[in-house]
Image (cartoon, rainbow, N blue to C red):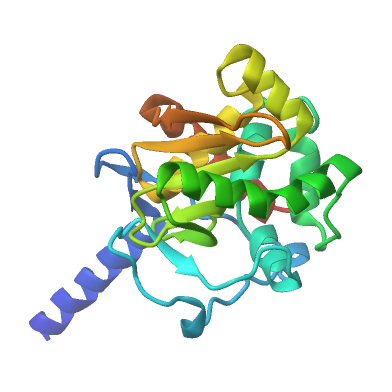
Amino acid sequence: MRIRGCLIAALRKIEEEYDNGMVSDFLGGRMKSEPKPQRSESNQGRQETVIHEDHIPSRTSNPKFVVVDLEQGTREWLEWRHNGIGASDASTIMGENRFSSAASLLREKRGPIGEPFENEAMALGKRLEPEARKRYIAQTGNEVRPVCLQSTQYHWLRASLDGLTVNHDAVVEIKCGRSAYWSTAKSRSVPDYYYGQLQHIMAVTGLDSLDFWCYWPDNPEILLPVQRDDDYIELLLSKELQFWNDVQKDA
């Protein structure tokens, strides 16, 4: 009876620690509290996209993420993207996106999956991306391919990459728009509104740097290395965690 009582007490202790949501900090292995989101009846209909085993070719050599076997632009990809926070959401959550607000993104994430907005410039950028990727590979020697990644530490932390090497040691973010190209060419630096996106990618991958590649037809390509900013990433993850908890709450 005494042994049974000890076991019950131990199990209760484990349950308490789980309820407190103790998770490992991305940056230093420290422990911090991640509050469990309260799911309301109105939110019970939200379903997390199931990642089947055949969608994960392998647990990569980098334990921070898994590669999810999805083709970008498909309906299945849209569902997976909707049920998490992607790199393109980062600047909005940080209040650095002049085209959108965190409040509008919150309404979008709480609602049903809609068709993504795409203007003429965005459509042109998508058409130019394969050629831009080929030119990046030719110049750098980095054999990259587009992939989808999901964090092993935070299920909602995701990224759809324009290019990742097979051994996962290099990432490229490609921009093919006229505005992005000339802004970058003029300043020789990454536009501020892309900074959150790039740091989010490094948070997912754990890499210390990535390549920012700008391409516009009939003009020289622009390659800018971007370094990891741990202070920014710590703030970003904190804001993204709070945002995702808000998504799970009643509107």
In the rendered structure, the answer to whether residue 203 lies left or right of residue 194 reads left
In the rendered structure, the answer to whether residue 211 lies left or right of residue 91 reads left
Query: Is residue 99 in view?
Result: yes
* Among the 4 quarters of the image, the one containing residue 111: bottom right
Q: Nearer the viewer, residue 17 or 236?
A: 236
Q: Residue at x 38, y 45 (%)?
A: 33
Indicate the position of residue 173 as horizontal and vertical percent values. Answer: 56, 42
Residue 199 position (above or below residue 23)? above
Indicate the position of residue 162 as horizontal and vertical percent values. Answer: 58, 51
Q: Nearer the viewer, residue 158 or 172?
A: 172
Query: Is residue 157 in view?
Result: no
In the rendered structure, the answer to whether residue 50 lies left or right of residue 41 reads left
Quarter placement of the N terminus: bottom left
Q: Residue at x 52, y 53 (%)?
A: 163
Q: Which of 79 and 140 is in front in this view?
A: 140
Q: Residue furthest top?
A: 187
Q: Which residue is drawn at 49% across and 60% down?
A: 150
Residue 202 position (above or below residue 247)? above
Q: Which residue is drawn at 35% across and 46% down?
A: 206
Indicate the position of residue 182 as horizontal and vertical percent values. Answer: 71, 22
* Among the 4 quarters of the image, the one containing residue 38: bottom right
